[in-house]
Image: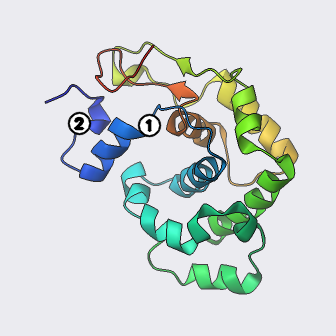
Amino acid sequence: MPKRCQWGDTDDLLMRDYHDNEWGKPCFDERKLFEMLILECAQAGLSWRTILHKREAYKLAFDNFDAEKVAGYSEDKIAELMQNRNIIRNRLKIVSAVTNAQLVLKLGSLSNFIWSYVNNTPIVNAWENHNQIPATSSLSDQINKDMKKIGFKFIGSTIIYSYLQSIGAVNDHMVWCEFRGQV
């Protein structure tokens, strides 16, 4: 059995696959970056496991995370999403996905925006113990502040830190984790 970070060492196959194949791996794909932003915002106050198990439903509900389509959602579409039992039916989270999609389109490239904060090179931390991983950092504080200035909704430094981990801009795999990747 390979050594994994504590949270990825589970019988939950979705969690294990996410840990092994996505978390901490650099992603520059615009659609995937938008997907992870929606999912991380949806996760606020909930467990990542909950969101991961709703991921396919989110993909269907949010038009395969097509920012252009999501940016154009009407009040009727938002009302439809509020009735969708397969996603988190929180109006603020749903409306923020629409607003954030509009802002992603204004940015031109979410990838260029986010990755510019780390000079297109992931930050690779050297944690020995899961308890060492912070919930926020000065980097997530700054990105959160800048995104809020632009108008992004339902974000915070903790959400942004998790987002940076999910897209591999920050690699917080334990130093002994076999899925840490090349350092």
Q: Residue at x 84, y 51 (%)?
A: 151
First in residue order: circle 1 vs circle 2: 2
The amino acid on which the numbered mark 2 sits, given as a three-letter code, is: Asp
Considering only vertical position in the picture, is 167 above or below 150? above
- Name the image quarter holding the N terminus: top left
Q: Residue at x 60, y 56 (%)?
A: 38
**Number of other residues with Cα within 10 Å of mark 2, as a class: few under 14, some 14 to 19, many 20 or more:** some
The amino acid on which the numbered mark 1 sits, given as a three-letter code, is: Trp
Q: At which x and y percent is residue 128?
A: 34, 14
Residue at the front extreme of this rendering: 29
Q: At which x and y percent is residue 59?
A: 51, 66
Residue identifier under label 1: 23
Q: Residue at x 58, y 22 (%)?
A: 122
Q: Quadrant of residue 74?
A: bottom right
- Name the image quarter holding the C terminus: top left
One can see residue 167 in this view:
yes
Query: Tag count in the figure?
Result: 2
Residue identifier under label 2: 9
